[in-house]
Amino acid sequence: MCFHSKQTKLALEVENRFKATIEKKELFKSSMDINGFDFGINPVITDENPNLIKHFNWGLIPSWSKDEDIKKLTLNARIETIEEKPSFKNSINKRCLVIANGFYEWQWQDSKGKNKIKYEIGIGNEDLFAFAGIYSQWVNQITGEIKDTYSIVTTQANQLMAEIHNTKKRMPIILKPEDESKWLQHDPISNFAYPYEVNLVAKAYPTDIITLW
């Protein structure tokens, strides 16, 4: 799964990497720890305008939802069932790139997860990359507020991630740079399922062993 990521680059670096302009620079900020359960706004590029970087809320709210509560369950979308799940099937061809340069996962050291080791995973050299994402627009029928929201698509863990995420053995789909446009152009979603992968590197935080009692 993927519930914690980071984006620590400056606005100009992000614009240069993705050859796109940030729509509202006042919303852009760097963060070492983007917690999905905060449901905050993060930079994305959509299939509607690949030359523009927008800010969407993490936690997809389908257009038919009566309220926002569903976002707790839609931070991630499993690629194997994405075409079947009511929450996601209307967004299969609403593709986006979720901009990041790292994410975090915790390795269980015992069968109950009382002791965990934190890992940071990326593509190396703190380089920027894009998660495969899908998005939706939701209108609050009471207030009229419009929210643009997204979910990160996940797949079966590769060998490295299976060792780190050693319970559920899942991982977010990180797109190869040359495939980012293919994702936005709606290439078949199955093309991006495991064994599709990029080379990842991981760094452990041995001092961050967490003991849960």
Image (tube, rainbow, N blue to C red):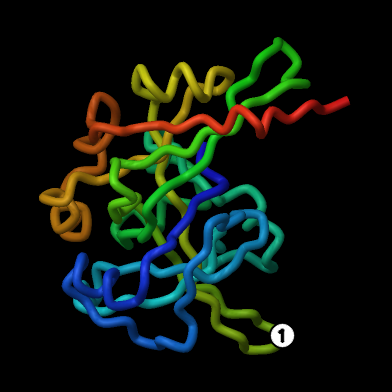
Question: In the picture, residue 16 is in which quadrant?
Answer: bottom left
Picture residue at 56% right of the left edge, 57% below the top: 34
Figure label count: 1
| 1 to the left or right of 187 | right
**In the image, is residue 49 above or below residue 73?**
below
Report the residue marked by disc 1: 142
Residue lying at 67% horizontally and 66% vertically, measured from the top left: 68
Judge from the rendering whether residue 160 lies leftward or rightward of residue 30; answer left or right. left
Camera-side residue: 31 or 80?
Answer: 31
Residue 166 location in percent, x, y?
54, 18
Residue 37 at x, y percent in the picture: 66, 55
Q: Quadrant of the C terminus?
A: top right
Residue 52 horizontal/vertical position (percent): 26, 79
**Left or right: 119, with 35 as reference point:** left
Residue furthest out toward the top: 111
Q: Which is more toward the observer, 164 or 77?
A: 164
Amino acid carrying label 1: it is Ile
Q: Secondary structure at mark 1?
A: loop
Residue 167: which quarter of the image? top right
Please rate how many residues cluster around mark 1, counting C-alpha atoms within 10 Å: few if below 14, some from 14 to 19, many from 20: few
